[in-house]
Image (cartoon, rainbow, N blue to C red):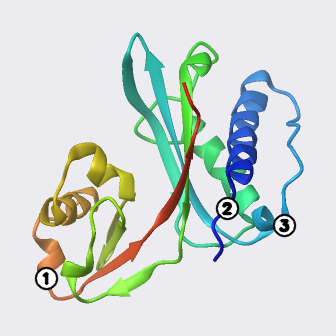
Amino acid sequence: MEPLSAEEGRILLVVARERIASALEQRDPVYPEPTPALLRRGGAFVTLRIVEGGRTSLRGCIGHIEAHDELVETVRSVAYSSAFQDYRFQPLTAAEYPHVSIEISVLSPLEEITDPSLVQPGTHGLYLKSAYRSGLLLPQVATEYGWNREEFLAHTCRKAGLPPTAWRAAGTTLYIFTAQIFEESN
């Protein structure tokens, strides 16, 4: 899969912002024309943060791991979900909107691994499955918190609601992926 250009990343950021703004303003969205690369199937996450008074806090993060829709449609869908359907937060309000910063992570396909030493914090994201539980952390999370490999694996287990050493257990499946990240400048 070819990397997206900076311009294609800018288009995705405009699409995400327009999807949220149009919902808040109760109007039909007006999107920029997508490039052919944005029409390929792709998985993506949209992360929203509130930037106010020199502080930044998470406001929503939802995504699709697998490529079921065109990338531009995936971004539209998960931007809306991040703003209004992340169960950890109340729906985004018009008062909060001017303080929102958007980050989009375009995901590579998942690669199942059997050797946890292959995990490179800051390069790889992690997706872990065990029975009916799963957890995912994007590559940039390990960097943000300064986690080493074992800490990253442990936190991915916790995200799945599992004990921190569950990544070592039989029946646990590990996947790695990379992400191309586009973010608004503040």
Residue ID for mark 2 = 4
Q: Secondary structure at mark 1?
A: loop
Residue ID for mark 1 = 169
Label 3: how many Cα within 10 Å (few below 14, some 14–19, many 20+): few
Residue ID for mark 3 = 36
Residue 66 appears at what percent x and percent y? 57, 72
Label 2: how many Cα within 10 Å (few below 14, some 14–19, many 20+): some
Label 1: how many Cα within 10 Å (few below 14, some 14–19, many 20+): few
Q: Secondary structure at mark 3?
A: helix
Q: Is the Cβ of the residue at disc 3 closer than 8 Å to that at disc 2?
A: no
Q: Amino acid at mark 3?
A: Pro
Q: Residue at x 37, y 85 (%)?
A: 112
Q: Amino acid at mark 1?
A: Ala
Quarter of the image that includes the C terminus: top right
Left or right, residue 125 beside residue 131: right
Q: Earlier in the sequence, mark 2 or mark 1?
A: 2
Name the image quarter holding residue 84.
top right
Name the image quarter holding residue 114.
bottom left
Left or right, residue 2 beside residue 115: right
